[in-house]
Image (spheres, coloured by chain):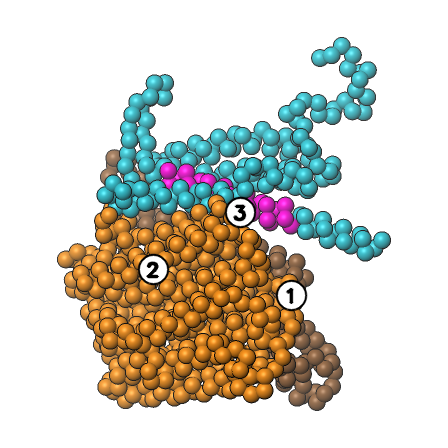
Amino acid sequence: MTATPEARVPWDRWDAPAEDWMLSGECPIGTERTLLLELAARILFPTVLVFSLYLLLVGHYGPGGGFSGGLVAGLAFVLRHIAGGRSEGPEIGARVKVRPPVLVGLGLGIAVVTALVPAAFGAPVLSSAKFAFDVPLLGHIEIVTSLALDVGVYLLIVGVVLDLLRSLGSGIERDAREAAAANAGEAA
Amino acid sequence: MNATLLPVLPVLLPLLGAAATVVAGRSAATQRIIGVTVLAAVAAVAAVLLVMADRDGPVVAEIGGWPAPVGIVLVADRISALLLLISTIVTLAVLVYAIDQRIVDYGRRTASTTFHPIFLVLSAGVSLAYLTGDLFSLFVAFEIMLAASYVLITRRTDATRIRSGMTYVIISLASSLLFLTTVALVYAATGTVNLADVATRVAELPTGLQTVLALLVVVTFGIKAAIVPLHFWLPDSYPNAPAPVTALFAGLLTKVGIYALLRTRTLIFPEDHPSTLLLVLAAVTMIVGVLGALAQNDLNRLLSFLLVSHIGFMIFGLAVSDAQGVAGTALYVVHHITVQATLFLVSGLITRRTGTVSIDAMGGLAKRAPLLAVLFAIPALTLAGVPPTSGFVAKLALLQAGADDGPATAIVAGVVILASLLTLYAVMRVWVRVFWGEPKEPLPDPDPHDDLVVGTARTSRPMVVASAALVVVSIAIAVAAGPLSGITSRAGDDLVDRTPYRTAVLGDGGAP
Amino acid sequence: MTTISLAMAAVVAVLYSVGFYLLLQRSLMRVLLGVVVLGHGANLLLQLAGGPPARPPILDGTGTEGMADPLPQALALTAVVITFAMTTYLLALGYRSWVLVGHDEVQDDLEDRRIARRRTVKASMGEEVSDHGEETEVDPGSAAASDDPVASVGENR
């Protein structure tokens, strides 16, 4: 707390967000924003991503797996898109450095390669093997090779959701904006 | 390298290629190389599979090491390996044509993140449909193939072409949901989805239930194969897509429906005598299709109606239900995949030359473009079944099969001859109006910005070469008619006998 | 052979009839809803094909007694994903149609429109055919790019 907050913050701005984590970087136009949703999205986004990774890892024995994990991760991005990703500027696709189609291709590639690798060891295609080992702190861990397939599916689904957000989410809004601008131009 | 890997490759290689072309989305040249290489590799694998299946019987791959009927199996027997080989060759030629059309229209450096991957995914779906030995995987294969085809037919679409895309998508979705219903009912009735296992258990069901399931199968695949009266979507949607897409769809998609009918009819619902329902459907399809073609002025629509008509020929062989008839259908499918795709590719070349698809507005092309005339004449005569061509060989096989099976088949065999003559009349009409007569000036492209390039006469050598290659393939089919009909008649024996397939999939327990 | 309860059979029947009814509508949005409902019906049927409700099919050392059949569940899961993908695709297509054409109506076959136009012209003997005005939209690449006498009839309005 600074010594004289009243001196620097005008009385009508006292509840404006000051902390970094509450400010979105290049905040878009100020219309139609809900602070509640943006804040919730900022807290939930990393949590949901971690949860999706959890689903991905436990998928072999418990409920979860690449598909549901990928969908949950995708939903995190959807939440972020709804909260603040709309409008121009920080489109969700622009924030993610990897282009969504590359993510889809990478996921598909990993999945197919995982399917083919057992053939190199003389096993049938898509068969899986299990490795078990003990790790200090974490205890006994079993890793099944089909996890790689799940990782591929996970990436693919995340890529698809991001691509959908880019083309159907931001794309539609861009179209609408351009149409509105064109109408305004004609009216003028 | 174990043999069980081979049936998996035609599915996984295109998928891997699709992944690679997406990742290489910025480099058009890389995409082209990957696409062509992958399809050439698949064609090689298919050839090996055909040789192995013909020599040693069906090649079976158990996915994940789970044996049938628990796990999913991929089975390459004679018929699936043969159709896989010819389909892949046609797909490869169409890809070369499409690549060069893209180079001519958009420039050498234009990359796309959708075209190549979707094309390869479609190829993977087609391969899976031919190879799978599992009813549900067949559904998945159809979905992969159709989803890719939805994208191809509505890609870069404009206001006037989106309607035909919608018709296609809605009809296909309806048939997919019917297919899913069929899968559910078959599973409820038999407790399995493995085709060989289903075949054993369906025989134990009450006759009424068998009939219901058989009818559902005919309707489901009848929509996909465009059998009259389930054909109405085809002439409405196919002609409006770009030429390579239409060629691919006309060559492959309906034939996959025919293959699914062939497999399920012979394996699951075998009949000892000609099927009256299919005979009627075959006759109606042949006549309605060819009469529809005669009424058309639009070249692509005319070809689409001819496609519908010739689906009837394949149904005829299937309806005869004996080994000879099934073999005739197999041979006809091989011939028709090649010829129909060629005709649509050449139609694309003609449209680019003349600027129109209206037959009335063309004329005198034989003088201006003699090569184009030859490229059109050979597949057109082949389609009509003029003697030295592969169409004649295939039609003869069908007629021989239908000649000695009672009066009903004899009548429909007469319809086959009538439909062939009408087909000849239809293509002659095109020939006279388009290639003879006063040369007419090409019309300008009505909309230079859309995906359909017409009237510019801008073609590249590879486009012509790709079309010519398919013409050569169809001539090769005629030349190699002896060995080929040997393979198809052995395939027909296998299909009607059912034992080789079931033993290969289920082990000795599969023998009836 | 498995049999299903009457209530479930009725639900499936309702889903199928509603689905097919919606599928026959003009608007792509209703068609989309039809596909969704029909997909639910088909998936429910697939579930029912596995027999009556039972214990979840998870192996935990207690044996397989009283377990549900896992295969239809796996199949239904795959089918749900496929239906979901198709729904998304139809949504995109509907949007595209709305952008391009201004509505999402599925229009008549070109041939149907031509025949309808021919009949109208014959019936009205050259009178105004304005109530069929929208049917003069023709597909380029089919008839618009041609000197089709039939196609040009409708344009004499």
Mark 3 highlights which residue?
A: B26
Measured as percent of width and height from the top left, residue B119 is found at 46, 57
Mark 1 highlights which residue?
A: B448
Rendered-image quadrant of the C terminus of chain C: bottom right
Measured as percent of width and height from the top left, residue B481 is found at 27, 76
Q: Is residue A48 left or right of residue B88?
A: right
Up the image or down, B304 lies above or below B410; here it is above
Up the image or down, B239 lies above or below C5; here it is below
Measured as percent of width and height from the top left, residue C51 is found at 32, 52
Q: Secondary structure at mark 1?
A: loop
Both marks 2 and 1 on one chain: yes
Three-letter amino acid code of the residue under disc 1? Pro
Cβ atoms under marks 1 and 3 closer than 8 Å: no
Dot 2 falls on which chain? B
Q: CA distance from mark 2 to mark 3?
A: 27 Å
Chain C colour is brown
Three-letter amino acid code of the residue under disc 2? Ala
B415 or B425: which is nearer to us? B425
Instruction: Label the cyan chain with its letter.
Output: A
> Residue at 70% across / 51% down in the picture?
A176
Q: Which residues are magenta?
A: A148-172
